[in-house]
Image (spheres, rainbow, N blue to C red):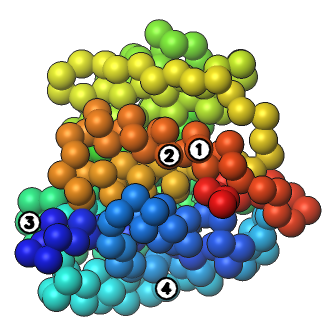
């Protein structure tokens, strides 16, 4: 927190015009959880509940400029990354982090493909993510397909999830929250691997189509908790509870997969 009591999160991610995922989900989540969010936008997407119609990229140097503008003045208690588009963007973000040797946790959501099937990270950039950003992450929050892409192998079943979370930590991330929502089953299992061991989070699967933006929401919720000074297991448990409530209360929207959102 800063001297005024702001729990500052700098979000480095892409915009979703539909308001369901990306920067828009991040802003809503950080605010709902008592934090202050600033943003460095990596790309604009023309997107709705049916899918991604277009992507307009931001030059990597200007992404750095946005990060620098925020960090030079406002500062950050936690940095969260989402859609990074390609290897050049990853390089720019890593260069800005390295130039500052910041002592704040970086939450890396390794966004690759939207639920609609549209690619948000160039296929060849997964390697760059693994090699240069994952080692800088205090927390990595992959879903099952992202964990499989980062590890180059299938991850199925609880034992394999625990093993995969540990293997991802072995790539240099401080901790890994591996999300099991993509697996079939009546309950959803997430696995948190930290230096202190492995914790399991399990809850009943909710019958809802409003799941667009769940990854962004969860990672931002953890980031807000970390920015407020919560320890990682507490921030992760609270983030999961917030996401569950958002899934439970979300109203349908548009013709496709509606966004997860905390509806009043
Ligand atoms: N669009 C943007 C800009 C995002 O950052 C993300 C984040 O993952 C998505 C879409 C994907 O959302 P989902 O996979 O939940 O549909």
Residue found farthest to the front: 264
Question: Looking at the rendered structure, which numbered label has been put on residue 242?
Answer: 2
Q: Are marks 1 and 2 in contact (CB under 8 Å)?
A: yes
Residue under label 4: 58
Q: CA distance from mark 3 to mark 2?
A: 31 Å
**For marks 4 and 1 on the same chain, the one whose residue lies earlier in the sequence:** 4
Residue under label 3: 101
Q: Are marks 2 and 4 in contact (CB under 8 Å)?
A: no
User: Going 45% across and 80% down the picture, which residue do you hit?
Assistant: 41
User: Going 39% across and 78% down the picture, which residue do you hit?
Assistant: 39
User: Going 50% across and 46% down the picture, which residue do you hit?
Assistant: 242
Q: Is residue 253 or residue 162 the one in the foreground?
A: 253
What secondary structure is marked by label 4?
Answer: loop
Q: CA distance from mark 2 to mark 4?
A: 31 Å
In front: mark 3 or mark 2? 2
**For marks 3 and 2 on the same chain, the one whose residue lies earlier in the sequence:** 3
Ligand 1 falls in which quarter?
A: bottom right
Residue under label 1: 245
The crowding category of the residue bearing disc 4, from other C-alpha atoms within 10 Å (few below 14, some 14 to 19, many at least 20), is some
Q: Is residue 76 or residue 263 the one in the foreground?
A: 263
For ligand 1, tell me if the residue under mark 3 lies within 8 Å: no
What secondary structure is marked by label 1?
Answer: helix
Query: What is the x, y in percent for residue 137?
Result: 26, 49
Q: CA distance from mark 4 to mark 1?
A: 34 Å
From the viewer's perspective, tell me whether residue 32 is left or right of residue 226: right
Residue 46 visible in image = yes
């Amino acid at each position: 927190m800063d001297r005024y009591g702001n729990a500052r999160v700098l979000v480095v991610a892409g915009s979703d015009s539909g308001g369901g995922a990306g920067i828009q989900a991040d802003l809503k989540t950080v605010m709902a959880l008592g934090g202050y969010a600033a943003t460095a936008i990596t790309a604009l997407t023309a997107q709705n509940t049916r899918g991604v119609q277009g992507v307009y990229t931001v030059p990597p140097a200007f992404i750095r400029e946005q990060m620098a503008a925020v960090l030079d003045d406002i500062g950050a208690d936690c940095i969260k990354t989402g859609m990074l588009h390609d290897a050049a963007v990853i390089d720019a973000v890593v260069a800005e982090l390295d130039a500052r040797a910041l002592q704040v946790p970086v939450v890396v959501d390794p966004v690759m493909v939207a639920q609609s099937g549209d690619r948000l990270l160039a296929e060849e950039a997964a390697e760059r993510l693994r090699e240069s950003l994952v080692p800088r992450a205090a927390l990595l929050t992959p879903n099952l397909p992202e964990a499989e892409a980062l590890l180059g192998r299938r991850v199925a079943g609880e034992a394999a999830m625990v093993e995969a979370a540990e293997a991802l930590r072995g790539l240099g991330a401080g901790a890994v929250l591996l999300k099991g929502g993509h697996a079939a089953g009546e309950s959803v299992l997430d696995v948190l691997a930290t230096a202190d061991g492995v914790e399991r989070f399990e809850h009943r699967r909710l019958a809802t189509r409003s799941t667009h933006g769940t990854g962004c929401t969860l990672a931002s919720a953890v980031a807000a908790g970390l920015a407020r000074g919560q320890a990682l297991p507490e921030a992760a448990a609270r983030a999961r509870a917030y996401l569950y409530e958002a899934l439970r209360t979300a109203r349908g929207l548009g013709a496709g997969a509606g966004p997860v959102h905390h509806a009043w």
